[in-house]
Amino acid sequence: MRIAEFWLVDIHICMNWQTITFDWNQARAFLVTAEEGSLSAAARALGLTQPTLSRQVAALEQTLGVTLFERVSKSLILTEAGIELADHVRAMGDAASRISLAASGKSQQVEGLVTVSTTDLMAAHLLPDILRELRKRAPGVEVKVLCTNSLSDLRRREADIAIRHVEPDHPDLYARKLRAAPARIFGARSLVEQFGRPLTRDDAPNLDFIGFDNNEELVGYLRAFGLKVTEANIRLGSPSGVVAWEFVRQGLGLAIMADEIAARFPEIVPAFSDIEPVSFPIWLVTHRELHTSQRIRVVFDHLAEGLLKAKLTKI
């Protein structure tokens, strides 16, 4: 179900410790504008005239007493308040969609193949729990997971949905940034503790690192941590993330890994005592069929919900 088809309701939200009531028409107009990136595109998506849509967005800003968009040339850029509100309204819209499907009994009728593209590490360690719940929610949906460390071309239908770490730049694609995920350099406890003291970045030139695919690119990432390393420090690797991570588990070298994956392995510990984690974004991307394909919408929403729950607060 696309956003434009949700029923009209009064929504009560808490902002700045005050309860404010506004019409879903206005919230819907704001959300579609935020996702489409312009008033003209949002008006086409909702079947409204641009002046009507503009009035609805302006009315919402007036009701809330905040500015939701900054007008830059012909583009609309969400303000900080707009970003926060978009997350809340999107969550309400997703919830409304699920309630509607459950009430009509259609949640059990959603069926068909959906191909999801992601890295093999995420597929192996984060997706199983998420897909187990999806099987209960939509048993008629068949999911095929395409494991790749490259960016699948959704426009060529290599996949219906992709989990990426970079924002796509093509207008035919719909992308939702879920969150930022922390990552750091890890090693097997047996390897790290054999030095008898905490490792520091000064030790890096004498350590071995595991390569995942492109060693030159990996050296760039490691140097971003402040490590003075070269490709000579990468003496073992594999284009398979699962295999490379197994090398780390076996104590053959250190590697960069997302905290939420490393936390699943008690034999793995952060390698350096003086290096802070970095963050990388998690994007959920699909093509515009999200608005017309019920099965893709169900899987997209479920993946978003599951990946948000996977967030760690501490390691």
Image (tube, grey):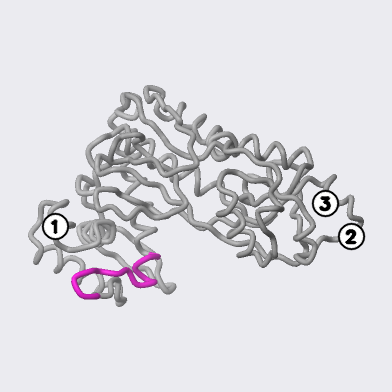
Give the Cα separation between the discs numbered 3 and 2.
8 Å
Q: Nearer the viewer, mark 1 or mark 2?
A: 2
- Amino acid type at image mark 1: Ala
- The x, y position of residue 20, in whole percent, is 33, 68
Q: Is residue 298 left or right of residue 231?
A: left
- The x, y position of residue 68, in whole percent, is 30, 71
Q: Nearer the viewer, residue 92 or 216?
A: 216
User: Which mark sits nearer the N-terminus, 3 or 2?
Assistant: 3
When asked about the image quadrant of residue 161, the answer is top left
The reply to whether the magenta stretch includes residue 79 is: yes
Give the Cα separation between the discs numbered 1 and 3.
57 Å
Label annotation for residue 197: 2
Identity of the residue drawn at 65% across and 41% down: 237
Q: Which residue is mark 3?
A: 192
Tag 1: Cα neighbours inside 10 Å, few (<14), some, or many (≥20)?
many
Q: Secondary structure at mark 1?
A: helix
Q: Which residue is mark 1?
A: 43
Q: Quadrant of the C terminus?
A: bottom right
- Amino acid type at image mark 3: Val
Q: Nearer the viewer, residue 210 or 107?
A: 210
Tag 2: Cα neighbours inside 10 Å, few (<14), some, or many (≥20)?
few
Q: Nearer the viewer, residue 94 or 196?
A: 196
Tag 3: Cα neighbours inside 10 Å, few (<14), some, or many (≥20)?
many
Identity of the residue drawn at 71% across and 50% down: 209
- The range drawn in magenta is 72-84
Q: Are marks 3 and 2 in contact (CB under 8 Å)?
A: no
Give the Cα separation between the discs numbered 1 and 2.
62 Å
User: Which mark sits nearer the N-terminus, 1 or 2?
Assistant: 1
The reply to whether the magenta stretch includes residue 147 is: no
Q: Quadrant of the N terminus?
A: top left
